[in-house]
Image: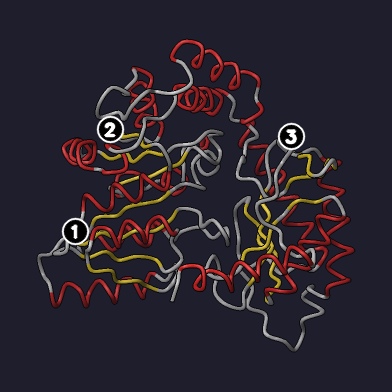
Amino acid sequence: MSLKTRCQPFARTVQAAKAEGYYPYFRPLAQSWGTEVEVNGRRIVMIGSNDYLGLSHEPRVMEAAANAMRHWGTGAGGSRFLCGNLVLHEVLEERLAAFVHKKKAVVHVTGFSTNLGAIACLLTPQDIILCDRENHASIFEGCQASRARLVPFTHNNVEAAAQKLADIREKNPHGLVLLITEGVFSMSGDLSPLPELVQLKKEFPDLLIYLDDAHGLGVMGPNGRGTVAHFGVTGQVDFIMGTFSKALASVGGFIAADDEDVLEYVRHHSRPLIFSAALPASNAATVLGCLDVLENEPERVARLWEITQRVHAGYREIGLITGDSKTPIIPIHIGDDQKAFAFARDLFDQGVFALPAIFPAVPRGQAVIRTAYMSTHEDRQIDFVLEVLSRLAKKHQIRADDLTGREQCGR
């Protein structure tokens, strides 16, 4: 089979969806104001962004990025391993480690490459990874690259994880076992049962826990210090991974830990770090500016939660099925993929930008419209979104009352 023959059916499916007006992805934004964006000459309300604190348009953060660009230029000129390691990168690592209360951090050029590089270089084929089934794709790529034995467990099911761990230890009493979970799951908005997971260390004291807190950093805990701070279990979590592309309004990622020797090893063996160009100074300065805001203006996080609670209440009043999200990520359960595409198209036509998530981002048959809110959303924008959602929920019959008698697999 030729490469063209292999790819053509999928390409034609996408082309047909575009022709029928159902294709929602890769929409080019002509301009962004954070909570609103311009698409095809129309200004519409954005409720799908991960810019949770709206800091990508904070003037002080933008000025910090511009100043760094003027000082260091637009690119680092090489990998950190060679000629691209800036003073700013090391300052950022110190600030990040302090922010999440760990001794050391190592910055990568993306969040994806952080998971890929760190997991792949730390684990070997003799090791075992216990992994939540709904973890991010970058985690599974890192697991695969490590060639360690992968043992998935049912999403957020501590009992299932404990049973798998007991089985592992019965067969392999001394092998290295790394449990990987997310703090806030990106599609469902679910919180990890982190306090219960760290309790597994009482029976299995050599268990290592790796937390991907991409969507928890800047959102959860005091001053947005993350899910470990929210639950007060920082000392029991061995590795904290975070990204800059969400609340920290930039691009990049890091892994933090108290074991400085292990992170020195990561620094010299993570292939994405060694073989990728370093993070531009403007991106690093953006993150430093965001950390300044987080540390000095806790009201930003408080405003995010105020909006989140209001939206949760509004969704309940409309009758939307949202699952058990306790975060600013609030999925609207649709179920059928085609209905999710139609709902997203109508939302867009009515002036609201939110995208459908289908398999493999969510389990088959459990398509959602993923909505996420920002601390900079205005009350008038929330009112508008809730009014549009109310009308379209009735039209598409996705309210809980509409689904009575049918399977309600809320997420």
The 10 Å Cα crowd at callout 3, few under 14, some 14 to 19, many 20 or more, is few
Q: Position of residue 314 (x, y in %)?
A: 79, 57
**Left or right: 344 in relation to 294:** right
Dot 2: element: strand
Residue drawn at point x = 10 percent, y = 65 percent: 174
Q: Earlier in the sequence, mark 1 or mark 3?
A: 3
Label 2 sits on what residue type? Lys
Dot 3: element: strand
* Residue under label 3: 31
How far apart are the two marked residues, 2 and 3, measured between alpha carbons? Answer: 37 Å
Q: Nearer the viewer, mark 1 or mark 3?
A: 3
In the rendered image, the vertical position of residue 370 relative to residue 256, given as above or below: below
Q: Earlier in the sequence, mark 1 or mark 2?
A: 2
**Left or right: 384 in relation to 10:** right
Q: Marks 2 and 1: in contact by CB < 8 Å? A: no
Q: Earlier in the sequence, mark 2 or mark 3?
A: 3
Label 1 sits on what residue type? Pro
The 10 Å Cα crowd at callout 1, few under 14, some 14 to 19, many 20 or more, is few
* Residue under label 2: 104
